[in-house]
Image (spheres, helix red, strand yellow):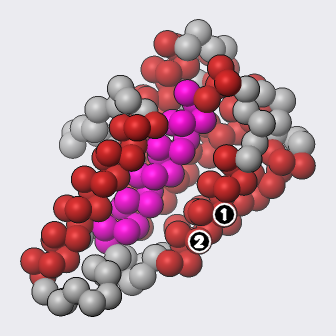
Amino acid sequence: MCKNATKTAAALMAAIEPTIKALLTETNLLNTPNGIAAINAYDAALAAVRAWVPGTTAQVVLEAISAFQGVFAALPIPDNYKVLANIILGGVIAVIGVLTANSPAPAGVASHPETQAMHQAAVAADTAVKVAVLVPHFKRSIWHSPESQYDSAWNKAVDAGGFSSSLKV
């Protein structure tokens, strides 16, 4: 298990907030009913992540995150900003990976330390694949915090896409 799974997941989730607000502001969606719904769903998901206890099921947290994903996916984000939306979604998938890997292995699997370790490895591999689909140029680093890596990926995408520097975090 991750030593500080709640702290790790919450820090990454918190790093996503300014990028959501920047994207919604840039696309004139922040103060729309859909934009407000997305921020409210995000806030609920962040609160659930912060309240989660590693080693316990993350079902309630995952439901809150899923609700955010649904609201966010329904936003009318212009095509030229999809690369930034994908970074946000990739960050959320990474949070889900941390939560899932640090929750008990699925029911029906013998509760043995090796089984839990295999569960964690499988979740980590699956998460890496899902993030790579959304953010193909992302390279994970063991030397930098997840939130730092997220911010770096975001800022590189802002630069590469020629977006306004006001989007940078």
Residue at 28% x, 38% y: name it: 140
Q: Position of residue 165 (x, y in %)?
A: 62, 15
- Picture quadrant of residue 161: top right
Answer yes or no: do the residues labelled 2 and 1 have beta carbons within 8 Å?
Answer: yes
Tell me which segment is drawn in magenta: 83-102
Give the label on residue 77, or none.
none
Secondary structure category for the residue under label 2: helix
Point out residue 62 in the picture as x, y percentages from the top left corner.
53, 69
> Residue 104 versus residue 132: which sits nearer the camera?
132
Please say if 134 is above or below 104: above
Mark 1: amino acid:
Ala
Quarter of the image where one finds residue 144: top left
Q: Is residue 168 above or below residue 160?
A: below
In this picture, residue 87 sits left or right of residue 47? left
Q: Residues within 10 Å of mark 1 (few under 14, many from 20)?
A: some
Q: Is residue 58 visible?
A: yes
Asked which secondary structure carries label 1, the reply is helix
Task: List x then y, in percent, for residue 23.
Answer: 69, 32
Q: Amino acid at mark 2?
A: Glu
Examine the structure image and report whether residue 60 is included in the region drawn in magenta: no
Q: Quadrant of the C terminus?
A: top right
In-image side of 57 versus 89 (left or right): left
Magenta stretch contains residue 98? yes
Q: Position of residue 104 (x, y in %)?
A: 31, 81
The overriding secondary structure of the stretch rendered in magenta is: helix
Q: Is residue 45 visible?
A: no
Q: Which mark is drawn over residue 67?
A: 1
Residue, far left: 114
The answer to which of 31 and 124 lies nearer the viewer is 124
Q: What residue does disc 2 label? A: 63
Residue 120 falls in image quadrant: bottom left
